[in-house]
Amino acid sequence: MAHLSARQLIDLVLDDGPWTSWDTPPERDGVGADYAEALERATERAGTDESVLTGEGTLRGRRVAVVACEFGFLAGSIGKAAAGRLVAAIGRATAEGVPLLAAPVSGGTRMQEGTPAFVRMVGISAAVARHRAAGLPYLVYLRHPTTGGVMASWGSLGHVTVAEPGALVGFLGPRVYEALYGEPFPDGVQTSENLYAHGIVDAVLPPEEVGDVVHRALEVLLARPSADAPEPAAVEVPDVDAWEAITRSRRPDRPGVRRLLRYAAADAIPLNGTGEGESDPGLLLALARFGDAPCVLLGQDRRGQTSAHPLGPGALREARRGMRLAVELGLPLLTIIDTPGAALSPEAEEGGLAGEIARCLADQATLRAPVLCLMLGEGNGGGALALLPADRVVAAQHAWLSPLPPEGASAIVHRDTAHAPDMARAQHVRAADLRAAGVVDRVVPEHPDAADEPEAFCRRVGEVLAWELARLMAQDLDALVGSRAARFAG
């Protein structure tokens, strides 16, 4: 695979304009003759004085900081001088409140410097952690190849992580593996595409598309809405029988989270998986913007949930990644409930489904971020409840929430399923009943059914979400967190 140099990548991604280097000449005290000669040859070959370039420029007019590896300099390896350069640049970006873009491409720690260089990965990781703790975006583009200590430190700490197509990305380089174990590493494991399939990276994109994605992500992450936008007009919602609402919510052509984003969001950047080796198609995680109001979105995806693959514990672990992102980035969390129920299977039990529901409830109820919940369709069981704790709850007219599907409740109480409509009415599952009980704050009407007017319905919901998100962002966070759990306590 042909390599773009660090400078070529920077020129491709950033605006045409001044690039301000933050680098100072590396110190080479105590370097042996052979290593000094290798450094000199690397400088001549790469045209840089170290394996890392740092500095700042603009991206679509917005100031950003960049740390980028140069593979032509000793395979992008990180020695003490390169590590010091990274720590200084990351710290400067943090102190000056600038988003940070990282483009690692490296074989890892520089072998000529051994353990003293190896332990510098701790300092680099700590610098990234301080940047994230300051609420500043850290976006990573993994290039071919990225392995070893770089992948196991600053290469794996991005809020959003994108990888180059076909790139070798992994912990232990395949050449090292074969030397240690006497057999080749299996093909296809340490690739960008495989990491995407396992929920470790968020996207696989060629270099020429990186600038656009970073710009869109920052447009969401740094957006701040006006707090004085007019509230959408309240509309009287017709009374609809509970069983009819449930029947309508189950229509296969009812719009779900993907059509909501298509019709109502100003932009959406899908993320992928837990970042820890797990992904579930039943949950859509994204950075999204409704009007000028940004959010981290957790949407149960009716299209991704099937009888063969219902919502599982991995989806809830992915949801908890989204919760952490909302806190770190200072954004509201938007959860969308739309599920026929979580998985009932040996795999789900062994995967800790009950525990993940409990952790979602606890985490979201106490989350240090504004939380808005949208009940969009079906809301069955613990899988739905896991995303309910919120400062405000909006519901579509035919949305509902129940501990079991009405058929299951009927089977328990009446030992048949024929009484499902009666159980739905008796259990107060519909949006109108939940509003009367104080669980739901606002009901969005359907005219007469979201499936019959998908675009108009989604746009109507989007207007409400934009206003509710902006309103929550203007409120005192301590007050929100203090009162959130109380609304469900009595």
Image: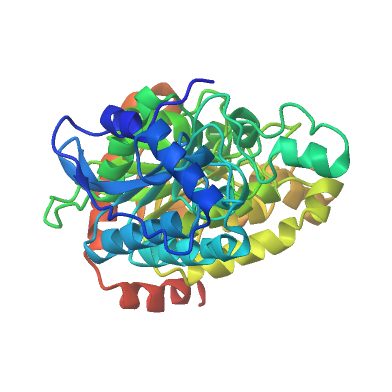
> Where is the N terminus found, in terms of image quarters?
top right
Q: Nearer the viewer, residue 248 or 262?
A: 262
Q: Residue 271: tell me if it is visible.
A: no
| Residue at the image point whose x is 59% and y is 60% from the top | 118
Q: Is residue 117 above or below residue 241?
A: below
Q: Is residue 20 left or right of residue 378?
A: left
Q: Residue 145's spot in the image, x, y percent?
A: 56, 34
Q: Residue 29 at x, y = what percent? A: 42, 63
Q: Is residue 196 visible?
A: yes
Question: In terms of image quadrants, where is residue 210?
Answer: top left
Foreground of the two, 397 or 389: 389
Q: In the image shown, does 381 or 350 lie closer to the viewer?
A: 350
* Up-down relation of residue 109 to residue 291 (above or below): below
Residue 490 sits above or below residue 411 on the image = below
Q: Residue at x 31, y 72 (%)?
A: 477
Q: From the top left corner, tell me how far across and down residue 48 is, in percent.
A: 35, 40
Q: Is residue 418 left or right of residue 40?
A: right
Q: Residue at x 35, y 57 (%)?
A: 332
Question: Disc count in the image?
Answer: 0
Between residue 417 and residue 463, name the one nearer to us.
Answer: 463
Q: Measured from the top left, where is residue 213 in percent x and y?
A: 35, 33
Is residue 414 found left or right of 463 in the rendered image?
A: right
Query: Residue at the location (83% across, 54% down)?
Result: 350
**Which colour scheme appears in the figure?**
rainbow
